Amino acid sequence: MNFDFSEDQKYLAGEARKFLEAESAIPVVREVLNDDDKAYSEGLWKKIAEMGWLGTAVPEEQGGLGLGMLEMCVLAEEMGRVLAPVPFSSTAYFLTEAVKLAGSDEVKNDILPRVVAGEIIGCYAASEGPGHPDPANLKTTFDGSTVSGTKIPVTDGGIATHAVVLAKEGSGASLVLVDLSGAGVTRKTLSTLDPTRGHAELTFDKTPGVRLGAAGDGASLNDQLMDKVAVLLAFEQLGGASRALEMAKEYALERYAFGRPIAGNQAIKHKLAEMYVKNEVARSNCFYGAWALSTDAPEMPEAAAAARVAASEAFWFASKENIQTHGGMGFTWEVDCHLYYRRAKLLAVQAGGPKVWKEKLVRALEQKNAA
């Protein structure tokens, strides 16, 4: 069992880092942060599509590169390091993986080539307000051809062209692909803690949709989709946590107090050491998740939950301690520390918060021990 990336994957990571550090530097993030009318960086999104990243894990027959999920993990970590202000996760994780998982050949041949070309922006619409969406209690309905109901909040819902909607159908639930240019769609922009990622409320009024998978299979398909997405989001969190640690270390070595770097103080050393330990725990669990994701291992639910829990904790802790290391200036708008804290809080609640994933982890371990 090899838990490290191959030389080719490490080369991809290096090239992706060079590209993103040049094209998605903090000024690009701040352009989106400071402009209420801008939900993402259109220029960066166009360049990412031109690089072919949207087709990384899409089969070649549908216009993709035909690589694997490990390459997606590599890119996700690099996207997380720079806080990329683009709908990459909504499109390449949620929508693409949902179509690959449960779409018919007709849907795959229609949607995936357009995703690869950058013509489609995706979003995932499951939440209907406070609390984790439970397929058994959904209010949004699907009657076999149209969707009705309200989803809030929806990441990238204001700019998406297509949505994957979790809706009630009969006594069960279904995943439904909705073209947001269809009739009966209303969008309302929302304000969130992280303005560099747009959010919206989506309301559907008998909006045409196409079921992904069989009727009533939505709960099972949604669980499978969330496990895949959880590993990719965990790598984004790992990338952000790693960069936050680097920022804290760089500042601690440069900032002098009483004639010596503050990095020499025991309290600062402890902060950096704790950040490093949590990041390495998260990295180990992310690699475990990547292995399960790329091999369709039966340990996938356990591995996805472990990666998600560890990465959420690592990113939140590293971004918080990065601010503390910078002292009072770390809280100010001009210093970039708060950008990482905002993204850490946002990513922690996407696709289920820490409590949800801790419960999944416990459930998976109980089932494993009972077997």
Image (tube, grey):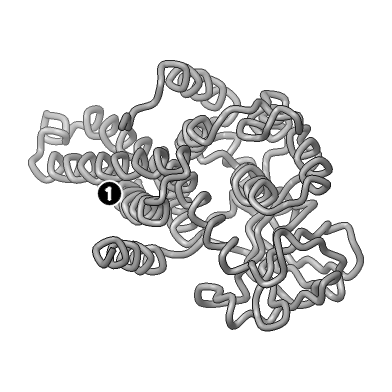
- Left or right for 107, reference 340: right
Q: Closest to the observer: 363 or 253?
A: 363
Residue at 59 percent across and 54 percent down: it is: 195
Image position, residue 165 (x, y; %): 70, 64
Q: Residue furthest right?
A: 183
**Helix, strand or loop at mark 1:** helix
Above or below, 260 against 273 in this view is above
Above or below, 321 against 142 in this view is above
Image position, residue 61 (x, y; %): 75, 29
Q: Tell me which corner region of the image, top left, top right, bottom left or bottom right, holds residue 269.
A: top left
Quadrant occupied by the N terminus: top left
- Left or right for 357, reference 276: right
- Left or right for 122, reference 180: left
Q: Tell me which corner region of the image, top left, top right, bottom left or bottom right, holds residue 322.
A: top left
Image position, residue 363 (x, y; %): 34, 68
Above or below, 286 against 367 in this view is above
Residue at 65 percent across and 78 percent down: it is: 172
Q: Residue furthest front?
A: 371
Quadrant occupied by the C terminus: bottom left
Asked if residue 206 can be seen in this view, the reply is yes
Asked if residue 331 can be seen in this view, the reply is no
Label 1 crowd bin: few (<14), some (14–19), many (20+), radius 10 Å? many
Q: Amino acid at mark 1?
A: Glu
Residue at 55 percent across and 76 percent down: it is: 134
Q: Which residue is mark 1?
A: 321
